[in-house]
Amino acid sequence: MRQSLLQKSWTLNGHSSSALNTLFEEILSADFELDSIFYARGPGRFSALKMTHIFLHTLCLVKSYKLFSVSSFYFNSAAPIHAFANKYFIQENQGIALKDFGIKIAQEFVLPEVLNIDDFDTQNKPLYILPPV
């Protein structure tokens, strides 16, 4: 099993567009040797997923980084992920479903101390799950 140890983590608040810019401005100005990026492809909020997808694909094309992705459930121990209102994405029967919990559920995404690289792949298409209109 290929693994990578967590070197540093950041906590940023705000919209994805400004948070991604702030984060990568700091990373690229520091003395990090970066050759790959690992990210959560979804499910999650549509706007944030779209922004992350476009930003990271563009950065990887410009900088020639390798890009790897995994389900967002990897980073929250498979807990429900907020979609909108009181509705959440859940893992169910080898798939993803939308469930109304009736209440707001606390969200916590965590970077693992050890990243199992083999859990990621290069199928870097965002996992958009939109409700019927």
Image (cartoon, rainbow, N blue to C red):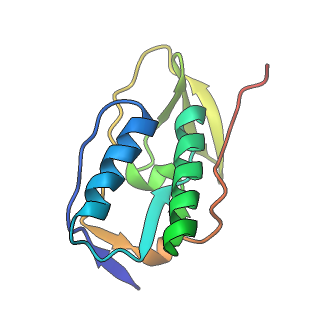
- Does residue 71 sit above or below 33 in this rendering? above
Can residue 45 be seen from the camera position used here? no
Q: Quadrant of the C terminus?
A: top right
Answer left or right for 122 relative to 28. right
| Image coordinates for residue 13, horizontal then vertical, percent | 30, 33
Which residue appears at 35% of the width and 70% of the height? 115
Image quadrant holding the N terminus, namely: bottom left
Say which of 26 and 40 sits in front: 26
Looking at the image, which is closer to me, 73 or 23?
A: 23
User: As drawn, which residue projects farthest toward the right?
Assistant: 133
Rendering coords of residue 110 (x, y %)? 30, 50
Would residue 111 be found to the left or right of residue 63 on screen? left
Can residue 80 be seen from the camera position used here?
yes
Identify the residue at horizontal 43%, vertical 15% (top origin). 103
Q: Is residue 125 above or below residue 48?
A: below
Quarter of the image for residue 57 reads bottom right
Residue at image coords 45%, 65%: 38
Q: Position of residue 53 (x, y in %)?
A: 58, 51
Question: Would residue 72 be found to the left or right of residue 31 on screen?
Answer: right
Q: Position of residue 114 (x, y in %)?
A: 28, 70
Q: Residue furthest bottom?
A: 1
Image point (26%, 55%), residue name: 26
